Every structure is written in structure tokens, then in C-alpha cells.
Image (tube, helix red, strand yellow):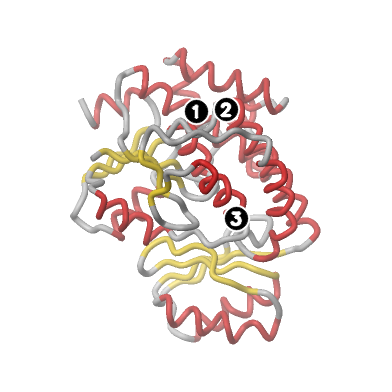
Amino acid sequence: MRVFMFPGQGSQYVGMGQSVFAVSEAARRVFEVAEEITGLPVRKLCFEGPLEELTRTLYLQPALTAVNLAVFSALQEKGFEPEIVCGHSLGEYSALFAAGIISLEDTFRLVLKRGELMEEAAQKYPGAMYAVIGLDRAKLEEIVAQAQVKGLVALANHNTPEQLVITGETEATAHAAELAKKAGAKRVVKLKVSGGYHSPLMKEAAQAFKTFLKDIPFSAPKKHFFSNVSAEKEEDPERIKELMGQQIESPVRWVEEIQNIYAFGGREFVEVGPRNVLTGLVKKILPGKVRLITIEDPKTLESQVF
């Protein structure tokens, strides 16, 4: 079965989306809707930057979603479709649209609101995130527990068996990062984000987002949809809406999610959007077990698939 994976924050770069915009009418329509709904200069941000503006949470969330869905729409024009969809953090909103759960307009309403709330929360409750490579989950959980003496710190993302992300208040998370280095982590990398996302620091943002979600209609998925929060296939629209409300403050269970997709029958994993971050993660989760394809535009599709 073919899986479409949609990337999240961290995959952006200035110039993203230009190639697909140039060749696909469906892709151009996605950018039009993005700008109509958000009131932001999405094309300019994606194509020209500057990177500092593009990376700002408020702007990045609609911009990256526009690129993901422009590529997706261009692939649909070619008749290249998935049976299973998933996304990493922000990318999950692209997956909701690809699964037929929410409309294109509501996708952009949601990511705009999510970006606003997350940016506000990051300013009100400063935080940080670090990727920790080379320690197992149990050991890192011990370290996180020790670091609580300095403040709030938690596990954010389980990206590969050997790569986890810690998140929380600035001082406490930095302390956990130092402890991880001392415990033998191969690498500890501070992420270029403006807050402690996927942590209790986002609690107020999550509550406000849940209220906003109430007015957005969710439909039953037309493709198999897997959730970051549960790591499972989800079918009930109200349950999916509830999970999306929790997602801002919950860990991304990417390893379990990908393993569950494989167990369900996923064998061709296609990264739809800029760069190849998710392809690299899946390669480490399911080494040698699946076909991996990265597609940023129809030209890539033709060279890798047809």
C-alpha cells in the first residue's frame, strides 16, 4: 500500500514550492486559497523569504502547508494517489486534507490559528527543544525526570529508535540536554524553534485551539489516516478532532505510528513536500523494508515513479 507522508516545521527553505507552482494549475489554486483565507503573502514568503520571516511560526505554518498541498494537488492531477496518509506535527493538517477529513479552506483556517496560538504561547512561556541522538527512550525518560528540578521538561517527539526530542522551559531543557551529553548521547542539537512545543507549555494554546476546532466540520476519512497522538489508524471524525486538539501539547509518536502503518500494510512511503526529513526517519525505523520516495514536484514524480 502507498503511504503519503507530509513534513512539518524544519523542512522549510526559501524557494520551496516554486517549481510545482510553475507547472501545475492545481498547485496554483492551493496558493490562491492559502492567501485568500490567511491574508498572508504566502507565495512571497515561500519563494522569496526572507528566511527569518518564513521561519516565524505564524507565517511558516500556512506557508509549509501550502507547499505540501500544492505538491499533493499536482500529484492528484497526475493520478498518483495514496491509500494511507500521515503527517509529522504540522504536517498532520496536510494529511487531514489529503484524507478528505477537512476542506482546503478549513485546513488553512486551522494552521493559521494554530500558528497564532503557538507563537503567543512561546512568547508568554519561553521554551526550547533539543534533538537527542544515541540514547534509548528509557534512559532519556530517566534524564527528563532528573531535570525536572530545574523546571518543566518533557519528551516531545520519538522520531527514530535513536532520535528523540526533549522540550520544555528553557533552563530545564538545557539542563536535560547537558545530562544527556554526560550520559553518552552521540549528539545533542538545539532545534531552531521559538518555543517548547509539544509540551505542557502549550496547554493554554491547546485549550484555545480546542474551542476554535468546535466550529470546523470533520468528515469520515476517505483514506486510511494515522494519528501522531495515538499512533493508530483513526476513523471517527469526532475522535480525530479531539486528537488534533491535544496534538499541540502532546508528544509525536512517530516511531510507533510508522511501525503501525507498516503492520497495516504500508510498503511504499512517499514524502510529499519540501526536502526529505521524513524519508530519513522512516529509513531508520524500517531499514530495508519499504520503498522510499521523495516528491517536491511533478518532475520528481516522473523521475522516481514513472
Q: What residue sits right under mark 3 in the picture?
A: 246
Q: CA distance from mark 3 to mark 2?
A: 32 Å
Check if mark 3's residue and mark 2's residue have beta carbons within 8 Å. no
Q: Position of residue 52 (x, y in %)?
A: 67, 43
Query: Which class describes the residues within 10 Å of circle 3: few (<14), some (14-19), or many (20+)?
Result: many
Q: Residue at x 39, y 74 (%)?
A: 134
- What amino acid is found at the position of numbered circle 3 in the picture? Gln
Q: Residue at x 44, y 22 (%)?
A: 20
Q: Measuring 68% from the left and 58% from the top, which residue is drawn there?
A: 195
Q: Is residue 265 left or right of residue 61?
A: left
Decide if residue 129 is on the left or right side of residue 181: right
Locate residue 285, reporting x and y percent.
30, 60
Q: Quadrant of the N terminus?
A: top left
Residue kind at label 2, given as amino acid type: Phe
- Say whether disc 3 or disc 1 marks the residue closer to the N-terminus: 1
* Numbered tag placed on residue 59 in the rendering: none
Q: Specify the farthest residue to the top.
A: 25
Mark 1: few/some/many CA within 10 Å (<14, 14-19, 20+): many
